[in-house]
Image: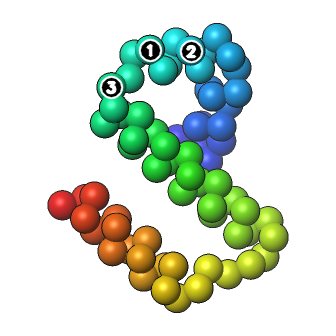
Amino acid sequence: MNKWYNYGKWRHPEKRKELMKNMNKEQAKDELIKVLSSQVVDLTMMSKIELGDDVIAEIKRLNEIINE
């Protein structure tokens, strides 16, 4: 799966409606996390900014909780 996988499928209105009606809350949460994570990575790379150490630590902590 490439980095643009999640981008295209949500841009098309009919496809988005179809995807949303087949999701439950847990799947929607997981999809939101994927989209937001990829957007954070893309934005930090494009704008050449760095996340603070506290933000990185919090992301790692939350990922550990999710992956337990």
Q: Position of residue 18 (x, y in %)?
A: 52, 12
Q: Is residue 26 left or right of residue 9?
A: left
Please tell me whether mark 3 sits on a helix, a strand or a loop: loop
- In percent of width and height, residue 43 lies at 72, 62
Q: Secondary structure at mark 2?
A: helix
Farthest residue, direction left:
68
Q: Quadrant of the C terminus?
A: bottom left
Residue assigned mark 1: 21
Q: Amino acid at mark 3?
A: Asn
Q: Position of residue 13 (x, y in %)?
A: 68, 17
Asked if residue 51 lies left or right of residue 44, the reply is: left
Q: Residue at position x 49%, y 79% from top?
A: 56
Which residue occupies 63% across, 63% down?
Answer: 41
Label for residue 24? 3
Q: What residue appears at the point 41 percent right and 34 percent down from the top-left corner?
A: 28
Q: Label 3 neighbourhood size at 10 Å, few (<14), some (14-19), many (20+)?
A: few
Q: Of callouts 3 and 2, which one flags the residue occurring earlier in the amino acid sequence?
A: 2
